[in-house]
Image (spheres, coloured by chain):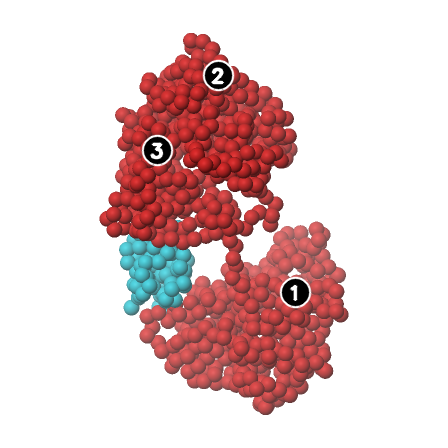
Amino acid sequence: MAENTEKFTIQFDGQSVEARSGDTVASSLYRAGRRIFTRSFKYHRPRGLLCMAGNCPNCMMNVDGIPNVRTCITPARAGMQVRHQNAYPSLDHDWLAGVQRFDWLMPVGWYYKAMTHKSTWHLAEPYIRRVAGLGVAPEPGSGSKDYEHAWMHSQVTVVGGGPAGLQAAFKLAQDGSHVVLVDDQPELGGHLRYRKQAGGISAELIAQLKANPRVEILSRAYCFGLYEGNLLGVLQFSPHAGAIERLIHLRSERVVVATGAYEVPFTFENNDLPGVMLSTAVQRLIRLHQIRPGSRAVIIAQGEQGDEVVADLREAEVEVVTILGPHQVISCAGSSHVTAVHATDGRFACDLVVMCGQHVPNAGLLNQSGGKLAWDKDRAAFLPVNLPAHISAVGEVTGTGLVRALLLPPEDVSFHKRSFVCLCSDVSTADLRDGISEGFDHIETLKRYTTLTMGPCQGRMCQLVGIGVCAHQTGRGMGETGVTTSRPPNPSVSLGALAGPRHHPVRRTPMHYAHDESGAVWLDMGEWKRPRYYRTASCDSERACVEQEYRAVREHLGLIDVSTLGKLDVKGHDAGKLLDKVYTNRFSDLKPGGVRYSVLCDDAGIMLDDGTISRLADDHYFITTTTGNLDFVQQWLEWWLVGTGWNVGITNVTGGRAAVNLAGPKARDVLKTLTECDLSSNAFPYMTCRDAEVAGVPSFLMRIGFVGETGWEIHFPAEYGEYLWNKLLDAGKSLGIRPFGIEAQRLLRLEKKHVIVGVDTDALSNPYESGMAWVAKLNKADFIGRNALSRLAQAEPQQKLVGFVMNEEAIPQDGAAILVDGALAGRVTSARYSPTNGKAVGLAWVLAKSAAEGAEIQIRVNGGVAKARIVRDAFYDPAGGRLRM
Amino acid sequence: MSFLIPCPHCGKRSVYEFRFGGEVKKRPQPDAAALEWMEYTYTKANESGVQKEWWFHRSGCRQWLQALRNTTSNEVVEAFYPE
């Protein structure tokens, strides 16, 4: 790696910084002389590189617009834009660094102590939001969309590409298993890559693994969660040039966890100063990036623990000033970087402090899998036990070969406000002591009170020390104190990766592009796109357009695309029996050629859906459902068929058929120019249906009237969608036809007081309270909901769905509150301005005692209150004469 | 929640392919007592252990099936089409 290095530049805060191939963002900045990488969460203390392994929060920056990127493991790329976070104006001169002088004002549990009144929070929040925290989320819509999701399956997944993981993957593949190897580093080898004394990597082993077709290697990928059914959440960085991150849903029959161990820091005053580093970080800088980490180093190590790094430092021509035992260290001196170590036997000037810390098994995944972590006194570590079947662990994560160091805290642990345990949220040993003395002496309550282990590093740096302090202060042992539960995601996952590529399926009706040409303004209804209204040259606002469409239907003729209606073809000798059982209305006695409306209830009598059902033949029915409920209704019908042995087949024909509703006083005049079918009311009365050709297209016509005018719903093969749509518009041109959208349809039906199930009703609405008692045929044999409905038929209704007309100009919003004598008495479900009434009309749920015809109610409109009156009949053509013309 | 359901037609599949239909309960006779209807409509056994449930294989065979699921471990012991 040292040879043939290629040089390029990245941008840091607007300055060019030289980087070399193999560099991470952090290593190139360090080589260029940068020592402060972040400012801490709460006190804005300067922080520098600590772990160089992606474990701690000290190097998080904004990279190419993405906040909180761990720069120590992010490969540098030419032209990268890197910016600092949480400091103003710069990392080296942060005005907010003064905050730490007031740390005495911010005791542990500060929020609970200071925010005792809700007004305090309102006053403090804007300030806290500015001062505390990490990176800033990108503006909505401005973030990158280059995130991917992928799904993978394997027989075995090995997590960790260190020596143990490599051996395991090799052996498993040799035995014939398909293996996926997940490694978070850019290259395989784990600690062998930077620990010269550990024996070096077997290049041959890695080459064999890479050549083995049964082994799939995911590099720069970390496993953030192990879920039920051996589902692994894996996040891979830069899987290819076109993607920032890829989230992999990896399902594996077996999982081998070889995540190794990571080194954690010691606690002493100012242990967080830039220049105080873990020994493995120093080794990484030297071996992986050929960087001389400092000029004069003090080593903190137990016994021979420091020998390895001392040799590395000497090789890198760093002077080793002294080697101190952890007990000897009192504090570090320096303001923006370490300048000396104060120890029991003197002061040692230096510009680098190397901590040979405790190595902690990285057992979070094993904990998530259901395994327990038990304290092993001999190895001074929490080790996985009782692993579930199909999960195993190898290497240092099990405790074997674990590098031993002094267990913390020592008996004479220094409780100092600037002796940091948790670097993510600035929690010190003194804070932990105070928290425990305030009664939060259980490790789980201490965690919640102090936020220990809850920051971006998820406890990697602080968990063991926190447990140690808790055990020491309470006099309980480490094992009894125990570990906090590991929960995914750990490490954290960006929201962009979770959101994924955001591909939403869209369904367009067969006439979609005809609507587009007519100026459709679109409305999303589930997956469907539907015209909300049509913007034409003659109208310039939604209200004007909708009113024109409305008038066309009431006075002449309108055409609406209803292809999105759910359409089910139900066939078989027992089809009528099924519909009688599931719908509240009766269908077995419906004559072929007849149409009936019905609702669908559950056994509690709650309305689930509604629609029309046409009988085509003795054993053949056609159902329409509401747009969003098709799947539900089909599944509901099939559910009640299970085990009956009835002869019924249900086919979903929604996508195969287009449908339009031609409605208005001129509907017959236009339609008869296109069909031979006798459309007179004698031959084709209201609520009947016929097969007929329309403009040569084999069609199915239903004479129904959702909008309250004479009209036909025409169903026909989707292939002819645009053709017949245009034919009908052409034929109606001279009579004033207009295409109309959802908004006009909602207004038209509202004037007729036609309820939309799911809009005007909710999960507590039954037909009686909704004013549709007629639709429940209690005198037929048992059907779904009959028992509950017969009880409801006898009961006093609690509330009623009623129509109202405003007494004044105001138009209430859907959902507006209704008041009677100043008390809340209901809510509006739909309200629109009704051109026929000259006032707004609507539907509303009102307490039964206040719902008498003619009663006055008050509705909240625009912060005030407007008067309205309850009306029993439809607001338009209450007798329904126009439907039957 | 990411367990697998062994669909009798499609094999082991992710739970996300299925729609949950609740506990399998016996619907009372039309003339059953009000209490029996109330129990059926509103109460659930919510077994801590293995219970029989309805599942609909939405992204597969599109059939209703029944599964014996351990509610404490989400292990599906068996899945079958009901008689």
Visible residue check, residue A700? yes
User: On residue A378, which mark appears?
Assistant: none
Mark 2 highlights which residue?
A: A350
Which of the marked residues, 1 or 2, is nearer the chain's N terminus?
2
Q: Chain of mark 3?
A: A
The C terminus of chain A - image quarter: bottom right
Q: Residues within 10 Å of mark 2 (few under 14, many from 20)?
A: many
User: On residue A521, which mark appears?
Assistant: 1
Q: Determine the residue positioned at 34% across, 55% down.
A: B4
Q: Secondary structure at mark 3?
A: helix
| Amino acid at the residue labelled 3 | Leu
On the image, the x and y values in percent for residue A796 come to 53, 63
On the image, the x and y values in percent for residue A111 come to 55, 30
In this picture, residue A694 sits left or right of residue A237: right
Q: Is residue A863 depicted above or below A31 in this figure?
A: below
Q: Secondary structure at mark 2?
A: loop
Q: Determine the residue positioned at 40% across, 56% down.
A: B16
- For marks 1 and 2, give the one nearer the viewer: 2
The N terminus of chain A - image quarter: top left
Callouts 1 and 2 close, C-beta under 8 Å: no
Q: Colour of chain B?
A: cyan
A522 vs A461, nearest the viewer: A461
- For marks 3 and 1, give the one nearer the viewer: 3
Q: Colour of chain A?
A: red
| Amino acid at the residue labelled 1 | Val
